[in-house]
Amino acid sequence: MGKRVLRREPRAHWALLTLTMLVVLAELCLNGYVTHAGAEGGESPQPSGGPAPAAAMHGAAVQRLDADGAVSSRATTGKTIALTFDDGPDPVWTPRILAVLARYQAHATFFEVGSRVNQYPGIAREVVAGGNEIGSHTFTHVAAADTAAWRLRLELTLTSNAVAAAVGRRPVLLRLPYSSSADALTGAEYTAWRDAAPQYLLVLADHDTNDWQRPGTGAIARAVRPGVVMLHDSGGDRAQTVAALEQAIPRLQAQGYRFVTVSQALHLPAAPAATTGQRWRGQALWLAQLTAAALARILTLIMVVAVVIGLLRLAVQLVTAGAHLRRVKRRHQRPLRNLGLVSIVVPAYNEAANIAATVRSLITNDYPAIEIIVVDDGSTDDTAGIVERLRLPRVHVIRQANAGKPAALNTGIRHARGDTLILVDGDTVFEPDAVGRLVQPLTEPQVGAVSGNTKVANRTGLLGRWQHLEYVLGFNLDRRMFEIARCMPTVPGAIGAFRRAAINDAGGVSAETLAEDTDFTMAVLRAGWLVVYEPRAVAWTEAPATLRQLWRQRYRWCYGTMQAMWKHRRTVLHRGAAGRLGRRGLAYLLLFQVLLPLTAPMIDVYGLYSILFLPLGKAAAVWAGFSAVQVATAAIALRLDGERYGPLWSLPLQQVIYRQLMYLVVIQSTVMAMLGGRLRWHRMVRTGAAAQHAGSPR
């Protein structure tokens, strides 16, 4: 309404926020890829692509692709057994297997999943330190037959980098997930090896123990025979595998067999040292994966905490709404009392579209003794002239130079003759019985202020419906709760009644914040007065009709509320009424109007991550459950307010645009507050939508 000291609004944080959200989404996608892209262990997918070439199917366990594409293979000779373990490293079973190998001075080859190497690099180092070797088992345990060549190359490169960072070596041996013996090699697996990884030696198995099926310790031990033996050190309970090694190794060693790595069995050179670049890339990958996992855990925790807090809030709102309903019913059983002259102060700045309807709705109210003081705060339109030409009795117009809404209110308060005052925005239209109902709680001597029930007049469009639901579901349920908790932080500027003594104790309306109604109400509470909510005192207001107008209004509200919270922050240390405001009212506002909205962008990113990587049915069920709870709560709130259920269909859609706009407002306000700037007064262009409710029944 009035003019303010201006400061250029910050914008750089939007680029930072966007970049942060993209980075977090990328990290979560990495975590999703690592944890959901492949499947460890288990039954092999159905064979595809027909059989592999004869040279591969009838070859030995270790195969090489020559430069001309021909397959050559080699087998172990003599009394050598090459134990191989797939799917690790595992924090439980790999160390136990290493302990058995070390006890009998045996060695083995571990085909490790790259993402698990990043999870447990220390175990990978223990593998190599024990005289064993590491081969590649892809990065996420993907089925090579069903994986595009480019992705398989990426998987192997990532695995190579992970192993390089962990042990300083570059793996040259490869075992494809779900592969087994040479005669079981499929054409699709051969093609994947040929197209994506011809530089690797493909290690199959002479003897597949099928230990992943847990056939029993004896069966696994009997399957350990000369040649390349396939076992697993991860992907499930490997107790039988460990016990089988305890049986087979000493028995076969007593028969003269040696347990060696695949490279040792074939007299191959050890894996080459990784380059510096590979190690650095591996370290970067390890850090990215570690960060991604931590972010996923943190955001999961935030989601759980937010849901729990939200459900607790809902429970408290519903319980207190019931208590408030019973209290209001008792209040309404008392006959209406005449409190003498009620002075209605209407500050107005460029309200030509609505001011006539506002004044008419006030003067025709059924309360017998009222006066109306319209304070024109330097309007540049014909606001004052419109009121004067109405020539209505008990309506007074005061003109003043533009000084702001608080100054206009204080001017009206000074000129008011009544000890009961109603402060009304210049775009508000009262129901015919609103004045009488609004002032009734002031018959109780401890009540200093009363909040009325503001309703959205222009609720026909989607944006209007969303605001209507917000007023009913958010504002009014909160007001019922605040009255029960005796910490009402805001009497809206659209409709509020005050005892003059409470106004004097509060020091009048302060101009120190943009949310003068919140600041003023908090001052009344600090002075020891009760503030209550009267749902039957209804006034209609014109809500923003465009997203730009809504942004401006909510930005001012949010920023002003933050100013008021900061101004009254010391009440958290006080006792009595001020302490209730601080420890209940301010704490609630801080949690639900500042802190949780600030986490909302990350929650949205997490929601997108869930859609991309979690089972779609599970994600849909969570969203449906959340929407059902929200719709049910809104239905209760609408019933309490005597409203129709029609707008409920639009509530789930509110999560797509409206919710994002609200939390972006909080972010902008927080940044502006941290920079210490003062926000310009964003006045909404009025269209006169509230005027249609003047004198009409609800």
Image (cartoon, rainbow, N blue to C red):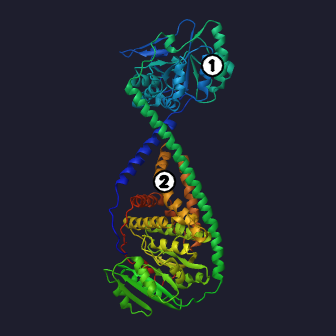
Residue at 56% x, 64% y is: 572
Is 459 situated left or right of 255 in this image? left
Instruction: Give the crowd class for mark 1: few <14, some 14-19, many >=20 residues within 10 Å.
Output: some
Image spot of residue 321 (x, y percent): 62, 69
Secondary structure of residue under mark 2: helix
Q: Is residue 96 above or below residue 456?
A: above
- Find the distance from the CA under tag 2 to the CA under tag 1: 49 Å
Residue at 58% x, 59% y is: 629
Image spot of residue 419 (x, y percent): 53, 87
Comparing 103 with 356, the one in front is: 103
Is 635 situated left or right of 599 in this image? right
Nearest to N terminus: mark 2 or mark 1: 1
Amino acid carrying mark 2 in the image: Thr
Evaluate whether residue 615 shows in this view.
Answer: no
Image mark for residue 558: none
Comparing 228 with 25, the one in front is: 25
The residue carrying mark 1 is 100
Image spot of residue 251 (x, y percent): 66, 11
Residue contact at pointers 2 and 1, CB within 8 angstroms = no
Image mark for residue 599: 2
Amino acid carrying mark 1 in the image: Val
Residue at 51% x, 64% y is: 569
**Residue farthest to the left, as pictured:** 380
Q: Is residue 291 above or below residue 548?
A: above
Image spot of residue 683 (x, y percent): 37, 72
